Amino acid sequence: MATSIPSLPATAVQDALTPTSATTAPSTRATKEALDLKADASGATGAAIVSKIDIELGGNAWRGAGGPGGGSQDSLSPGSATVPPSVDAVVAGLAGKAASSHAHTASAITDFTEASQDVVGAMVAAAGGSYDDGAGTISLPSGGGGADTLLTGYTIGANAAVGAGDTIVQAFGKVQAQINAKADANGAATISGNVAITAAAHANRTTNVSAVSASTFTAATAGAADGAIFSFVQVGAGALTITGDVQLSPGVASATTNGQGSVLDGIYVASLNKLLLTNRTAASGGGGTAPVQDLALKTASGAADADETLATLSIPARAAGDRTRIIAFFNIGNGGVNNVDFKIVWGAEIVDFLQFATPSQHMTVAVDFTVLHRSTTEHITKPWVARLNERVNGSSGVMTMNTSAATNLSFVVQRKVDTNRTAQLLGCRAEF
């Protein structure tokens, strides 16, 4: 049985949804325009808007401007500025429209992946890269980063601060130049000949002396600040001697390094206007070199009347002020009556000579002496007497030979006439 619809007073029609009104009905045209602005969605989410009207009017049309039976339009199209829509028309129009606010996941949005790729691809392309829409891949522009990006065009730049306008390659070049300058300022220097000692080249760092050097410090031109530190290490055969504006502190014997491995330190004192040498050291009494030795038993087996080297020690270069201690133990058998000679030879010079002439003599002899080096050419040691036409070093004990370069120290034996007598070297050593 149909619901009885009460008669309604005439209703005014408003051709817009604003301003809102509780007594005026919207026209079909205004309703349609508002619904057309809503996005489509699954389900008639807008139907609840007219549910109360639907209940009260029983699904029939609103009464129009003429009161009951005044007429309404049961469709939103074509729109009218004077006729209101029916409830059914409004419900139909709201069907399929989305709510004003909603939340969708990316998977629920049509074409989301493709649209996102297109946006990113356009940004990459604008920066100089490329985007393959079909393959869904991008290529970054040159210099766009990555572990495998080459620093094309890189060179060491100026020793200057990195600026905001520098490229990555330019920035690396400047940083490397700063590192290089820092290393040069504090790294070790080397002297291998006669040079001028200056603050720029030698101050506040270690300077290695690798060859004979007579170098000069001149305060007026050295450019040294008060308190600048100078440190020289003799790493080679030649010594360093510093001349010029130099002063020795108490206890410093000379302005010359004290053999291989020795250190000569100084500090510039502005009030004195001189390089004050404060320290001169050498380990093991000169040279700073570890002892060398051969403690294996050596027995002569060569022919008679011929020199036979039983052992050889490597001796570093020796400088003025150095000293060298030489130790050896010889053993002579009694199997014959002829002489046996022992020689210790530094390079080509004999520094000690022993001859055993007593028939049937059997003994062990210890040799222990020191060579004091006045310079690289003049040396003081114990005198020895030559026999059987061997070379003579003189009774004064002063020996001449050049020790500015490393050489060998040889321990030599010669059995005279025959080889009946046993000759042995029990061990030998050199200390510096």
Image: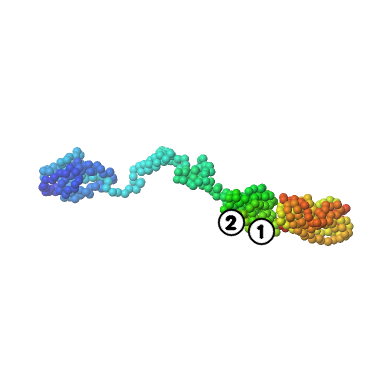
User: Residue 6 placed where, x, y %?
Assistant: 11, 48
**In which quadrant of the rendered view does residue 253 lie?**
bottom right
> Circle 1 sits in a helix, a strand or a loop, which is it?
loop
* Residue for point 66% across, 60% down: 251
Which residue bears the numbered disc 2?
A: 271
* Residue for point 71% across, 54% down: 320
Disc nearer the start of the sequence (1/2): 1
Query: Depth check: 356 or 316 in front?
Result: 316
User: Residue 202 placed where, x, y %?
Assistant: 60, 51
User: Residue 122 placed where, x, y %?
Assistant: 39, 40
**In which quadrant of the rendered view does residue 300 lie?**
bottom right
Query: Depth check: 323 or 341 in front?
Result: 323
Query: Depth check: 151 or 30 in front?
Result: 151
> Circle 2 sits in a helix, a strand or a loop, which is it?
loop
Residue 115 shown left or right of residue 186 in the figure: left
How many discs mark residues in the rendered view?
2
Query: Depth check: 26 or 281 in front?
Result: 281
Q: Is residue 42 visible?
A: yes
**In which quadrant of the rendered view does residue 116 lie?**
top left
Residue 97 shown left or right of residue 236 in the figure: left
Crowd tier of the residue under label 1, counting other residues whose Cα lies within 10 Å: few below 14, some 14–19, many 20 or above: some
Q: Amino acid at mark 1?
A: Val
Determine which of the numbered discs, if any, sits on residue 239 in the image: none
Residue 407 shown left or right of residue 136 in the figure: right
Q: Amino acid at mark 2?
A: Ser
Crowd tier of the residue under label 2, counting other residues whose Cα lies within 10 Å: few below 14, some 14–19, many 20 or above: few
Which residue bears the numbered disc 1?
A: 252
